[in-house]
Image (cartoon, grey):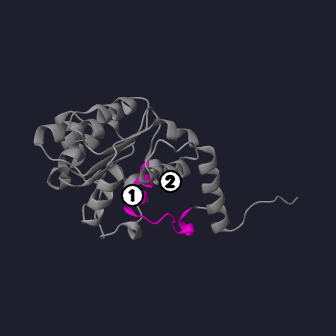
Amino acid sequence: MTTSYLRTGPDIYEESFRIIRAETDLSRFPADVARVVVRMIHAAGDTTIAEDVAFSQGVVDAASAALRGGAPVLCDSSMVATGIIPSRLPADNDVVCLIKDPELARVAAAKGITKTMAAVDLWLPRLEGAVVAIGNAPTALFRLLEVVADRGVRPAAVIGIPVGFVGAAESKQALVDSPLGLEHLVVRGRRGGSAMTVAAVNAMASTDERTNTSRQGN
């Protein structure tokens, strides 16, 4: 039995993004945000996430400028950190994830908080002007807002797309509604995760509309 299907990376790439743009209403997004949303849709395989994207107008410019200036990317999980493509980072930026720090479990237990909350506390020395990427832990996003409010530090941009049934929707709405006025991009509701978060960071890290098709997994 023979099945007809596309067989080359470039062809699959072009057809994927043609379908996304044909099936998605991107009219409410500025061009730079639309480019990021398209990448997120590609990662999720779901055009309907565009309906739930909330963002600040300057989020892409802020994140891109911070990365060009050498800012670190602070990640809540190993999955997010691993997915960020080093070759797309413009200044050999550090990608920081502290979740495997052997002290983290002890600190979290002593404080009665999650390990990801404890990791956010440890971000403090590098948080000013950083790009924050949260794709898994709603408690990390809640804690980030507390630390920013308490300490007066301001990350350059927050890509806050944690996934889950407990606290995910609430933490993202808290970021959108926060009087802190942080540059942000979220997917409202329960949906989110590492793949969408990584796609957003990689898109913001580069103005190149195309990516290496060998990384598309096709």
Report x, y in % for residue 139. Answer: 30, 36
Type of the residue with mark 2: Arg
Which region of the structure is painted magenta? 197-216
Q: Quadrant of the N terminus?
A: bottom right
Report x, y in % for residue 140. Answer: 29, 40
Q: Are marks 1 and 2 in contact (CB under 8 Å)?
A: no
Sequence order check: which comes first, mark 1 or mark 2? 2
> Is 203 in the magenta?
yes
Residue beneath label 1, please?
A: 204
- The correct choice, above or below, for 106 with respect to 211 in the image is above
Report x, y in % for residue 91. Answer: 29, 70
> Is 18 in the magenta?
no
- The correct choice, above or below, for 54 with respect to 75 in the image is above
Q: Is residue 151 left or right of residue 63?
A: left
Looking at the rendered structure, the number of numbered marks drawn on it comes to 2
Chief secondary structure of the magenta portion: helix
Residue beneath label 2, please?
A: 39
Q: Quadrant of residue 180?
A: top left
**Point 44% across, 44% down: residue:** 193
Q: Is residue 210 left or right of residue 108?
A: right
